[in-house]
Image (cartoon, helix red, strand yellow):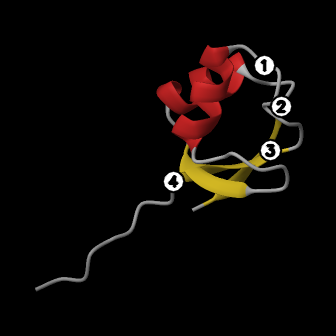
Amino acid sequence: MSPRKTKSTKMLRITQVRSGIGRQEHQKRVLKGLGLGRIGRTVVRPDHPAIRGMVDKIPHLVSVEEVEG
């Protein structure tokens, strides 16, 4: 068997920088869907159009960095 070649995929490091308190319900759901919920919490997600779309809904609540995965 030959060793698997791992494909270098881009990942997004998403950090919550502002609170969801007082925000519209759909924005709170997007935070929860990304796995966020507290200021300072960071998650790493694959760079897919669906994730980009979620981040585009709440740019005022999160910061995003591209990282190699």
Q: Residues within 10 Å of mark 3 (few under 14, many from 20)?
A: many
Q: Secondary structure at mark 2?
A: loop
Three-letter residue code for mark 2: Leu
Q: Residues within 10 Å of mark 1 (few under 14, many from 20)?
A: few
Answer left or right for 37 relative to 15.
Answer: left
Three-letter residue code for mark 3: Gln
The image position of residue 40, as x and y in percent, is 84, 55
Which of the two residues, 19 or 52, is positioned nearer the viewer here?
Answer: 19
Could you tell me if the residues under marks 2 and 1 are in contact, i.e. CB atoms within 8 Å?
Answer: yes
Q: Which disc is residue 16 wearing?
A: 3
Which of the two residues, 22 or 8, is positioned nearer the viewer here?
Answer: 22
In the image, residue 26 sits, relative to residue 30, either above or below, namely: above
Could you tell me if the residues under marks 3 and 2 are in contact, i.e. CB atoms within 8 Å?
Answer: yes
Disc 4 versus disc 2: nearer the observer: 2
Q: Which disc is residue 9 wearing?
A: 4
The residue carrying mark 1 is 23
Quadrant including the N terminus = bottom left
Q: Secondary structure at mark 4?
A: loop
Answer left or right for 47 relative to 67.
Answer: left
Mark sitting earlier along the chain (2/1): 1
